[in-house]
Amino acid sequence: MSQSHQQPALSKCPGCEEPPVAGDLFCGACGYDLSAVPARPDDRPTMAITVPPIAAAPAAEAVRWPVAEETDSSDVPAPVVRPADVPGTDSGGRPLTGPDTPDAESGRGAASPSGPVRTGGPDAAAARVRHDDRADPGGAEASGDFALAAPDPRAPEHTASFAAAPAPGAKVCVACRSGRVDADGYCENCGHAQPRERDHMEQELDAVAAVSDRGLRHHRNEDSFAVSSTALPDGSPAVVAIVCDGVSSASRPDEASAAAASAANEALLESLPRGTHPQQAMHEAIVAASEAVNALAREPAGAREHDAHRHQNAPACTLVGAVMAGGLLIVGWVGDSRVYWVPEDRTQPTARLTEDDSWAAQMVAAGLMNEAEAYADERAHAITGWLGADAYELEPHTAAFKPDRPGLVVVCTDGLWNYAESAEEMAAAVPADAQRQPLHAARALVGHALDGGGHDNVTVALVPFAVRPQGAGSACDTV
């Protein structure tokens, strides 16, 4: 991802006081926007504040507590606390009753916090302790005790009385499981904020599955994907997987990735059934995705004329896609999202099928650094190619492969491959049953990234590739 201006280092998050990770734009614990924290001023003058002396209050007279009639096991009289031993009023403003004087309204002696206060009358043993009769609605009146001022909000009867039953098909709150979710994303019953739909997305078709997750450090998911299937003119199937990663330093990166994924998918579903060669169809799909992202930066109707810098920091994203059709594997990309080939027979070689449009890749290609040195540099993920109105030049990359053995196509963003960078590491992270259970394998790969730290959004699409073995050879040969 392209890098943005770094804010001054903070010792703790202003929202939750957790120490933020260096370079993060949002707090990993609460999502607080760290870029909105103002810089600390250079000068912090100290001013002496004088506090006028406070007159000493007269010492209060010590309270003489009565001595209990009984003694404890050490023959020491146990203290007795009585509400009326100290002059005062109750919560209603009435004077507290004396220890031996019955309550004028209830006819009972005043109760201490630990039990009924012993009175001198003959009904002392019958003095009752105040309690709440929630189980018996008539118990409060019958016993003379007070009913609760408000019902327990966790009780089913309270929920039913305060929230109308959600209409069939309406979204139900994930917290109270009964309230209706309003258009603003909050429960009308308990007020709980609902998780956003894009925080975690999953989709599975017959021959492809994809999972996307917000990760552990970002406050929203800026990745998007589209998976689909169609048929070629001869009736053979074609499977499509598109994965896009929003550029965090650009505006509206989540909208950019969603628009690109949708546009590329629609273009492929339109051109492949017409008989367009899959590699040409992939090229056209990337161009269509670029136009969709560019449209987000165009001036809307009625825009303010003085907004001269609107096109700066335009929405942007990367794109990578794979098409399995006619025994070919077509990949296309712009940016640093990747495609890996993992053969079903793990003794066979694996391969990375894309080259990053990034600073690190340029350094390696120029022979200035080896791959380990380049990707260890802090500039490694600065991308040199992307979709967006401010891109220097659109250069879609496409390649065609013809695998000679069954395997798995892994289409993913850097949120995953950061934790399995080489082809061998990615193959080790892919579950052994990925060919038969692609959705389960995609979930496992997302979990692998989250277990590794989840510093970025994570998206992966898996496309099982089934062919008959045709002898020895490379796992994938460029056509």
Image: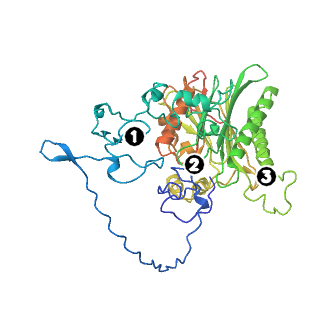
Binning the other alpha carbons within 10 Å of mark 2 as few (below 14), some (14 to 19) or many (20 upward) gives many
For the residues marked 3 and 2, what is the alpha-carbon distance in whole angstroms?
24 Å
Q: Pinpoint residue 8: horizontal percent, then vertical percent.
A: 55, 66
From the viewer's perspective, tell me whether residue 387 is left or right of residue 305: left
Residue annotated with mark 2 = 218
At label 1, the amino acid type is Asp
User: Disc 1 versus disc 2: distance between alpha carbons?
Assistant: 62 Å
How would you rate the neighbour count of disc 1 (Cα within 10 Å): few for under 14, some for 14-19, many for 20 or more? Answer: some
If you read the primary sequence from the N terminus, does the residue marked by circle 1 or circle 3 appear first?
1
- Report the mark closest to the observer, 3 or 2: 2
- Quarter occupied by the C terminus: top right
What SS does tag 1 mark? loop
Between residue 34 and residue 278, name the one nearer to us.
34
**Local secondary structure at mark 3:** loop
- In x, y percent, where is residue 200? 59, 37
Which disc is residue 168 wearing? none
Relative vertical location of residue 340 with respect to residue 432 in this rendering, above or below: below
Mark 1 or 3, which is nearer the eye?
1
Q: Which comes before the other along the chain, label 1 or label 2?
A: 1
Instruction: Name the residue at 61% across, 46% down.
Output: 220
Amino acid type shown at disc 3: Ala
Identify whether 457 is placed above or below 276.
below
Q: Identify the residue at horizontal 68%, vertical 25% (top origin).
A: 169
Residue drawn 25% across and 56% down? Answer: 64
The percent coordinates of residue 369 (x first, y second) are 54, 58
Label drawn at residue 103: 1
Nearest the viewer among 24 and 292 is 24
Q: With respect to residue 53, does 282 lie above or below?
A: above
Residue 24 is drawn in which quadrant?
bottom right
Residue holding disc 3: 297
Frontmost residue, 217 versus 343: 217
